[in-house]
Image (cartoon, coloured by chain):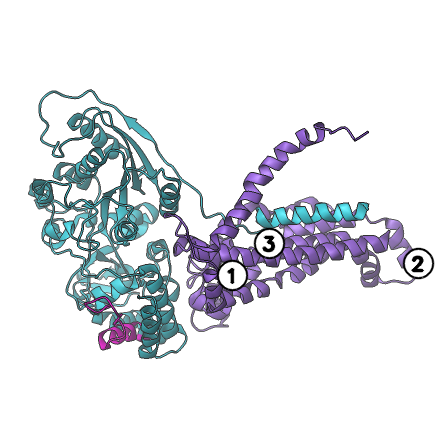
Chain colours: A cyan, B purple
């Protein structure tokens, strides 16, 4: 009898062990990081405020605002902007939280629990706006925002992530992707002889100004760098949004106009994939960085001084300066090589409003306030981001001659940001289709499957998801 | 006259039952329900019957993940063997032996995320291992260890084994110290050499610990996640070479937002762990009865 009781207790214990944390390895990814909760109340100033452009803001509204990876670096900026917001819209209380690595998991949990924030900072680049808007979780803005307010933004950015022709975000800060170059590898270490002639040793002997202007030039460049320095190229495929990359880089038509079948097995798509297949076969790219899920992996590789170049935004140069100051002095910047689409990129960040907010006007007001020309200009002055509002660029700050390498794109920024557009059509079952494409690309890159066959198979599987 | 109902035992049991109910029973029931639904976490679940299970049957990645999880179980015998050897080695009264034992325990208290990152740096294209092999002239150019499908799972298993060594060694060490010296003396008198002494005395004496470690480490192996996540940068390895059951469950739930499918995978995993547990209990029970 005792043995049986013991056995039953042991079974219960083991079941609990199986359901609970194990001794050696347990999933611990879902950890919330609420960095800051801020309630700012300011005595209102009398008279109309030129920044108060949203009508009928609900009195005494209390709204929650979530940002992504901005605390603690930008605490002062966020707090002072909220204080200005309270002057423009007195009586509205803003609770600010910054979420970081677990942002999306926290947001999903909050939506599931029915306590999602009223105002949310979402990445346009990662497709989060369309992901949440498609599920009916975001407030459509077109009919709720006065035309005069819409006109404050670059037209391409206001329309940069439409879902069924409707906009769900205020375009926020933008970045200008550049190629950041480690001249120690790319060019070499400069040596000056007695007569003042400069020669370069230990590098690939390449000139920054000769960096390829189009993406077709990358395979040859990587081959040269590998041959001369033994270093692999730090290139990353957007594993979470591969169809987007196909569109921008390869000008691939990914879905038919009527949306009834996928078409990413076209000659353009095969040619695009073949370029990466050839680079993998030649052994000129770091495969770990090429297909990582985390952009930090590729950034860390560059920051550690082991890569010749890396595509990034100027605002991340501060990371290089902070983590490897010795490398910072050897940095150079080249314009991003253009893909066949001729469009540099879509926007970076937006601010959206929860469809179920109790205070839609106050929430719209806050989202608009953070993205207005003044708020964006103030933000741009403390970090190398670029406003989504043309008026911000009228400030002398943008016409001043750049001093730091982070600011090198500043004088040209307005013209570049004005060209940003989302040229990727709405993809049904986007996450599932992306997974199918990722598997096809892996088969072609690492399993010897012909790119045409891999993409044909992927299209067949993706089409099966369509009604 | 009927027995008087006793409230007191139930009063004492209530806190534990509440905790088990809220944190174990309710989640299990919820997962069973979600496994029959199409559920994206952010929107309400929609009943779909057996669709998730039917999809699992035809999902090649699921079968790959299942196979990887079973392959991962190889960690258990390796761990038991190595830990017993280590426990025998450190079970000596030598100067500084406690420091030596503590060294083995450091990976256990370091945390799998920190250890995973260290290993990743070590196995990096420009990492320590490639540097060593290049300097020895054993390879001509760096191997991208973590990008080679054939290496992903073995590296993760090696990491799990290395991390578990200290923890399980301590369990065997405690077991060894409970074995009477008289048994070893008797074995020597019977003509056993050092190897035979441990084979005939230490190993049988460690039977309860071996059973315990087998159960715990095999369940941990079936639930492996952190090592895979860190080593593969959240991708699961090229061509899904490192995807295990729990990793695939996580991918479905939190990356693809298919919580219904993830719940179906969790149910399969629950059945497998339950089967393992029952098998191990039977083993334990038979051993106890034989001894008694």
The residue that label 1 is drawn on is B244
Between B189 and B202, the one lying in front of the other is: B202
Give the farthest residue toward the right: B189
Q: Residue B219 lies in what quarter of the image?
A: bottom right
Which is more N-terminal, label 2 or label 3? 2
The residue that label 3 is drawn on is B220
Q: Residue at x 51, y 55 (%)?
A: B225
Assign a secondary structure to mark 1: loop
Q: Is residue A125 visible?
A: yes
Give the spatial CA distance, label 3 vs label 2.
41 Å
Decide: few, some or many residues near mark 3? Use Cα within 10 Å; few <14, some 14-19, many ≥20: many
Give the spatial CA distance, label 3 vs label 1.
12 Å
Judge left or right: residue A278 versus residue B133.
Answer: left
Q: Residue at x 79, y 58 (%)?
A: B203
Number of numbered labels in the structure image: 3
Between A228 and B169, the one lying in front of the other is: B169
Q: Chain of mark 1?
A: B
The mark closer to the camera, 3 or 2, is 3
The magenta segment: A254-278
Task: Give me the disc on residue B189.
Answer: 2
Q: Residue A110 lies in what quarter of the image?
A: top left
A55 is higher (above) or lower (below) than B265: above
């Amino acid at each position: 009898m005792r043995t049986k009781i013991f056995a039953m207790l042991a079974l219960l214990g083991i079941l609990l062990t199986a359901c609970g944390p194990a001794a050696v390895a347990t999933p611990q990814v879902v950890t919330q990081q609420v960095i800051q909760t801020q309630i700012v109340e300011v005595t209102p100033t009398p008279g109309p405020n030129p920044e108060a452009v949203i009508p009928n803001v609900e009195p005494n509204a209390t709204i929650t605002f979530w940002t992504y990876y901005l605390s603690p670096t930008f605490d002062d900026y966020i707090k002072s902007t909220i204080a200005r917001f309270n002057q423009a819209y007195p009586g509205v209380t803003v609770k600010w939280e910054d979420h970081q690595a677990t942002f999306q998991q926290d947001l999903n949990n909050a939506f599931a629990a029915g306590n999602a924030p009223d105002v949310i900072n979402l990445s346009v680049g990662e497709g989060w706006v369309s992901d949440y808007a498609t599920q009916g979780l975001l407030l459509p803005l077109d009919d709720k925002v006065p035309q005069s307010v819409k006109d404050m933004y670059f037209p391409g950015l206001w329309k940069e992530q439409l879902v069924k022709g409707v906009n769900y975000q205020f375009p926020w800060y933008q970045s200008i992707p550049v190629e950041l170059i480690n001249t120690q590898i790319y060019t070499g270490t400069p040596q000056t002889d007695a007569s003042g002639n400069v020669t370069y040793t230990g590098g690939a002997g390449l000139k920054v100004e000769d960096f390829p202007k189009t993406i077709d030039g990358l395979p040859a460049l990587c081959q040269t760098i590998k041959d001369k320095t033994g270093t692999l190229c730090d290139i990353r495929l957007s594993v979470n949004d591969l169809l987007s990359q196909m569109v921008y880089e390869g000008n691939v038509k990914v879905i038919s106009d009527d949306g009834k079948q996928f078409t990413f097995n076209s000659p353009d798509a095969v040619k695009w994939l073949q370029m990466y297949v050839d680079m993998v076969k030649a052994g000129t790219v770091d495969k770990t960085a090429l297909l990582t899920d985390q952009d930090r992996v590729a950034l860390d590789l560059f920051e550690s001084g082991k890569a010749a170049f890396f595509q990034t935004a100027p605002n991340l140069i501060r990371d290089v300066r902070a983590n490897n100051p010795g490398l910072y002095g050897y940095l150079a910047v080249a314009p991003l090589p253009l893909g066949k689409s001729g469009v540099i990129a879509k926007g970076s960040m937006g601010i959206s409003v929860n469809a179920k907010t109790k205070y839609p006007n106050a929430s719209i007001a806050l989202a608009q306030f953070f993205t207005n020309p003044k708020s964006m200009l103030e933000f741009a002055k403390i970090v190398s981001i670029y406003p989504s509002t043309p008026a911000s660029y009228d400030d002398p700050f943008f016409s001043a001659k750049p001093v730091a390498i982070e600011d090198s794109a500043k004088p040209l920024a307005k013209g570049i940001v004005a060209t940003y557009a989302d040229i990727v059509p709405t993809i049904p079952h986007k996450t599932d289709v992306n997974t199918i494409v990722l598997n096809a690309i892996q088969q072609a890159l690492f399993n010897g499957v012909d790119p045409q066959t891999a993409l044909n198979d992927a299209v067949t599987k993706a089409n099966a998801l369509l009604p | 006259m009927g027995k008087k109902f006793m409230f007191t035992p139930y009063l004492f049991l209530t806190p534990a039952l509440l905790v088990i109910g809220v944190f174990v029973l309710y989640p299990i029931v919820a997962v069973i329900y979600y496994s029959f639904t199409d559920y994206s976490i952010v929107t309400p679940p929609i009943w779909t019957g057996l669709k998730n299970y039917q999809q699992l049957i035809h999902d090649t990645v699921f079968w790959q993940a299942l196979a990887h999880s079973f392959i991962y179980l190889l960690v258990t015998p390796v761990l038991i063997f190595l830990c017993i050897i280590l426990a025998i080695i450190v079970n000596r009264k030598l100067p500084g032996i406690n420091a030596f034992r503590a060294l083995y325990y450091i990976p256990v208290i370091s945390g799998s995320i920190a250890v995973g990152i260290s290993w990743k740096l070590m196995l990096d294209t420009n990492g320590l291992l490639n540097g060593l092999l290049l300097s020895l002239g054993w390879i001509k150019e760096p191997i991208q260890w973590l990008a080679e499908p054939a290496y992903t799972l073995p590296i993760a298993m090696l990491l799990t084994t290395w991390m578990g060594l200290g923890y399980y060694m301590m369990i065997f060490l405690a077991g060894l110290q409970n074995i009477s010296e008289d048994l070893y003396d008797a074995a020597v008198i019977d003509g056993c050499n050092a190897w035979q002494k441990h084979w005939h005395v230490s190993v049988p004496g460690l039977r309860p610990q071996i059973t315990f470690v087998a159960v715990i480490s095999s369940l941990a192996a079936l639930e492996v996640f952190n090592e895979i996540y860190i080593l593969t940068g959240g991708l699961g390895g090229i061509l899904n070479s490192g995807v295990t059951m729990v990793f695939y469950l996580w991918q479905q739930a939190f990356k693809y937002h298919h919580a219904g499918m993830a719940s179906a995978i969790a149910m399969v995993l629950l059945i497998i762990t339950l089967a393992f547990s029952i098998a191990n209990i039977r083993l334990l029970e038979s051993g106890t009865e034989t001894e008694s």
